[in-house]
Amino acid sequence: MRKKIVAGNWKMNKDIEEGVSLISEILELSKSVELSAKEEIVIIPPFIHLTEAKKKLGSSEVKIGAQNVHHKAEGAYTGEVSSRMLASIDMDYCLVGHSERRTYQKETDEQMLGKTRQLLEAGIQPIFCLGESLEERESDRYFEVVKSQLTVIFTLSEEEFSNVVIAYEPVWAIGTGKTASSDQAQEIHAYLRRLISEKYGEAVANDTTILYGGSCKPENAADLFSKEDVDGGLIGGASLDAQSFIGIIKAL
């Protein structure tokens, strides 16, 4: 079943006390939001928050995810976290291939595919991120770029791919205040869905959740989410303020 999701990526923000306070605010404000069976709220805090956040969320409907995972199952990888570790604290989701990790950590296609496979084997849903830079957008290579990024995980089986969420994040619109227009977002989302349909069939494509990420705010969320192929958002800065985050959720 194709889900509508609003996921808040805290990135490297909030200490423990601030994180607990933010979750408390989100839980309180979320009482005013009625979610259907196919709608989800997800928070994605830094690693140090995950155990405490899971306790704080308790039996609420809010899901939780991690920001990263290692592409190997275990070993001498100081500072890294495995999918089995994340599964042991009941993570629902985990980001893979966020543009900041592609840029700063120089993550490779091989690593991103490995991370995706590790998560699926552990029963955690990957949120696989992709998107073009400003130079790639302005040179009209954005279709080529997102196709190359998406097809990295086309070695997954149909069953495996059915458990992956896709997040389109135009790099030129992340933290810049710029936002892709709803028509630009729809154009890419429809293209990605078409590529999935060509590979895995129409049924899988129609059931795949594709999120938009890139300066999504309460002011523009309703317009973005109104598009047929935009199934919610991967929210950055606005997820650090409970009022703004809930405002985006209400736009679903």
Image (cartoon, rainbow, N blue to C red):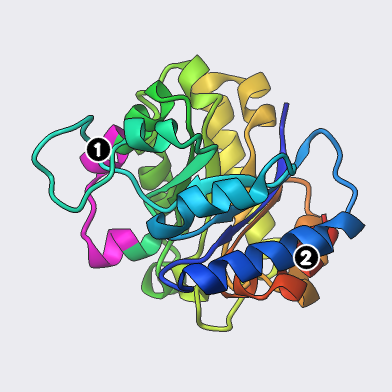
Horizontal arrangement in the rendering, residue 94 relative to residue 163 (left or right): left
Nearer to the camera, 159 or 145: 159
Q: Which residues are magenta?
A: 101-114
**Is residue 108 magenta-colored?**
yes
Q: Secondary structure at mark 2?
A: helix
Residue 249: image location, x then y, percent: 78, 59
Q: How would you classify the magenta stretch by its main secondary structure?
A: helix
User: Which numbered tag is attached to residue 246?
Assistant: 2
Which amino acid, by three-letter code, is at mark 1? His
Res 143 seen here: no
- Which residue does the image show at 39% across and 55% down from the upper left? 47
- Which residue does the image show at 49% across and 25% down from the upper left? 161
Asked if 242 appears above or below 86 in the picture, the reply is below
Q: Which residue is mark 1?
A: 71
Residue 34: image location, x then y, percent: 90, 48
**Is residue 181 magenta-colored?**
no
Nearer to the camera, 74 or 57: 57
Upstream in sequence: badge 1 or badge 2:
1
- Which residue does the image show at 39% across and 67% down from the upper left? 136
- Which residue does the image show at 45% across and 67% down from the upper left? 11
Nearer to the camera, 17 or 44: 17
The extreme bottom residue here reads: 177
Horizontal arrangement in the rendering, residue 138 relative to residue 118 (left or right): right
